[in-house]
Image (spheres, rainbow, N blue to C red):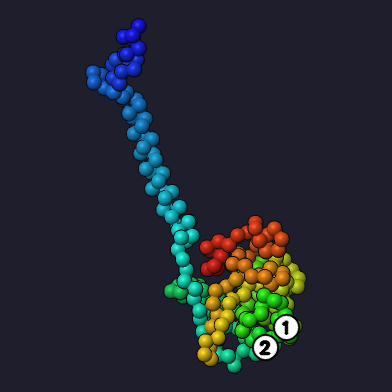
Amino acid sequence: MADKRAQQRSKYTLDRGIPGAFEGETITRRRFMTGTAHGAGAVAAAAFTLPALGFAIGPVFKSTPHRWEVVGTVDEFPDNNYVPVVLTLVPDIGEAGKTTAYVRKFNPALDTDPYDKGTPYIAISDRCVHLGCPVRWVDASERFVCPCHGGVYDILGERVSGPPVRPLDRFYSRVTGEDVELGPRFSVNSKLRRFSPRLPGEPLDGIGQYLYPSTPGAKKL
Ligand code: FES
């Protein structure tokens, strides 16, 4: 009885009475082939998935330096009308990395929101927050108008009508010497409270600010 148990625990396949076993063999050929096939399958799957995973989550770990870009001098921007300027969001990719911002000087009569206090210039992004079409500032009606689905925003970039889900995004601004510089983009909710950049279609009021956290892609688009 003890002998039988010892045979069952033996590492040799022959001792364990496995059909077709060879002398000195510790693993059956079937198990060996199955393990080899699974191993090869895992290597092949990793060859496809690891690079894709790297591309997907790599930007999370890559810190993007804050860029400040000169867009004009202090006397080029009035406080009651916008001047369009071109900004580089992603360098070295030509026109695809550029965007337009509408800039005016801070106006205490207009910019009464506490979040705007201390901002020297108001810089509104031209990217519609519905689906991303470029909006246009219409001087006569003092509105930003989106040509795609009729989104309309007021002079502060706040939604007036149409499908957009929040006010237009903005850029940080500062003055260095005589130059006006624009920095990173940020998103705002309907009270103009600032948030890190969000993608179009992502609301920031109420529970929206938690449902749609900022993503690395949102900073570049
Ligand atoms: S993209 Fe502007 S309203 Fe739809």
x 65%, y 58%: residue: 210
> Residue 14, how many percent across, how many down?
28, 16
- What element does badge 2 sit on? loop
The disc placed on residue 95 is none
Residue at image point 45% right, 52% down:
53
Q: Residue furthest top?
A: 1
The image quadrant that residue 10 belongs to is top left
The image shows residue 52 at horizontal and vertical percentages of 44, 53
Q: Is residue 88 above or below residue 10?
A: below
- Can residue 143 be spotted in the picture? no
- Are there few (<14), some (14-19), or many (20+) residues within 10 Å of tag 2? some
Does residue 135 show up? yes
Q: Amino acid at mark 2?
A: Asp
| Quadrant where the image shows the C terminus | bottom right
- Residue 115 quadrant: bottom right
Q: Quadrant of residue 208?
A: bottom right
Residue nearer the viewer, 194 or 101: 194
Residue type at the position of mark 1: Leu
Q: Which residue is mark 2?
A: 79
Residue contact at pointers 2 and 1, CB within 8 angstroms: yes
Task: Give the side of residue 132 with respect to residue 13, left or right.
Answer: right
Q: Quadrant of the N terminus?
A: top left
- In this view, the residue in front, 163 or 169, is 169
Most extreme residue toward the left is: 23
Q: Which residue is mark 1?
A: 110
Q: Residue 123: horizontal and vertical position, in percent?
A: 61, 80
Callout 1 secondary element = loop
- Residue 207, relative to residue 26: is it above or below? below
Q: Position of residue 2 (x, y in %)?
A: 33, 9
Q: Is residue 18 left or right of residue 208?
A: left
